[in-house]
Image (tube, helix red, strand yellow):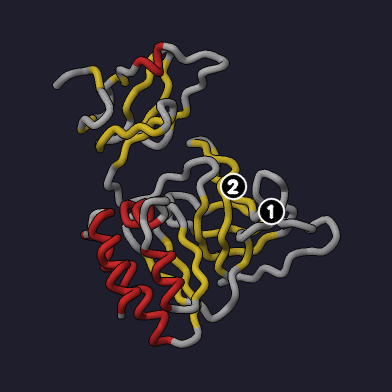
């Protein structure tokens, strides 16, 4: 096995990333490391088994098929409030540790205390991820605004998908969600942790949307485009 890894290769933990963009990295030409890559000294080391990917010449990550979600900073996740203690909530996001959510992590929390209860579905953004402490999520974006984050409306349907499927349907090239929106009226929150929340007008529509999402598991992006076109014709 070659110890040097290049984009498109199947890589294994311990391999060193070999790319010109890494060698030329400086304060102006920054390189962003995604999941599956870690910096050790002057080298970039692969930490997960998968396919090495690159975007925009400075963003690198390993596309892997892992089962358990590992929190990554700035990723959006869906979770369920499991415990309410003092000034913070414990949210189950499917990782090894439950995430912490402080009541001040909501827009306008200094004026009024957010109405969050055990069992509520939360769509949040990971703010702190470390192997030495619990992850922390917030319900505001980088501008301090709520956006589409926060407590989801009651009565929705929550289900789990593989991490690979979550990344696939959140890909800008994937037309599945937009096509479903033209056929059905629904709300959704899809986390990078593989948890999906859906709410529509009735149970039949909700189940149809969930089945369409699950069906995309074994499809490629071109196949999803064909499937989306068929949905629009039906």
Kindly report the distance in space between the C-alpha atoms of the residues bearing marks 2 and 1. 8 Å
Q: Which mark is residue 102?
A: 1
Which of the two labelled residues, at mark 2 and mark 1, occupies the earlier sequence position?
1
**Residue at the right extreme?**
111
In this rendering, the count of numbered labels is: 2
- Determine which quarter of the picture holds residue 24: top left
The residue sitting at the front extreme is 233
Depth check: 158 or 169 in front?
Answer: 169
Task: Please name the residue shown 21% across and 59% down the image.
Answer: 218
Determine contact: label 2, label 1, CB under 8 Å: yes
Q: Nearer the viewer, residue 36 or 131?
A: 36
Disc 1, SS = strand
Q: Position of residue 192 (x, y in %)?
A: 44, 52
Q: Tell me where residue 111 appears, x and y as whole percent.
A: 85, 60
Give the numbered dot on residue 136: 2
- Give the numbered dot on residue 63: none
| x, y percent for residue 18 | 30, 17
Name the residue nearer the viewer: 169 or 16: 169
Q: Residue at x 27, y 72 (%)?
A: 230
Residue drawn at (51%, 21%) of the image: 30
In the picture, the quarter occupied by the N terminus is top left
Left or right, residue 85 beside residue 185: right
| Secondary structure at numbered mark 2 | strand
Left or right of 56 on screen, residue 102: right
Q: Is residue 5 left or right of residue 57?
A: left
Q: Residue at x 56, y 72 (%)?
A: 119
- Compared to residue 197, the image places residue 99 above or below, namely above
- Figure check: 169 above or below 197: above
């Amino acid at each position: 096995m070659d110890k040097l890894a290049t984009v498109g290769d199947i890589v294994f933990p311990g391999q060193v990333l070999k790319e010109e963009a890494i060698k030329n990295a400086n304060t102006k030409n920054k390189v962003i490391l995604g999941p599956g890559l870690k910096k050790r000294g002057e080298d970039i080391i692969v930490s997960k088994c998968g396919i090495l990917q690159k975007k925009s010449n400075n963003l690198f990550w390993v596309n892997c098929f892992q089962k358990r979600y590992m929190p990554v900073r700035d990723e959006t996740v869906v979770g369920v409030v499991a415990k309410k203690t003092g000034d913070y909530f414990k949210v189950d996001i499917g990782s090894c540790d439950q995430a912490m959510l402080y009541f001040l992590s909501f827009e306008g929390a200094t004026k009024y205390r957010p109405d969050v209860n055990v069992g509520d579905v939360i769509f949040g953004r990971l703010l702190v991820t470390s192997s030495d402490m619990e992850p922390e999520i917030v319900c505001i974006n980088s501008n301090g605004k709520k956006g589409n984050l926060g407590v989801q409306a009651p009565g929705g349907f929550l289900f789990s998908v593989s991490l690979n499927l979550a990344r696939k349907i959140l890909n800008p090239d994937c037309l599945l969600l937009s096509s479903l929106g033209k056929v059905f009226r629904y709300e959704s929150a899809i986390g990078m942790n593989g948890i999906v929340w859906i709410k529509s007008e009735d149970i039949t529509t909700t189940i149809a949307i969930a089945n369409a999402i699950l069906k995309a598991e074994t499809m490629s992006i071109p196949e999803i485009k064909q499937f989306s076109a068929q949905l629009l014709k039906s």
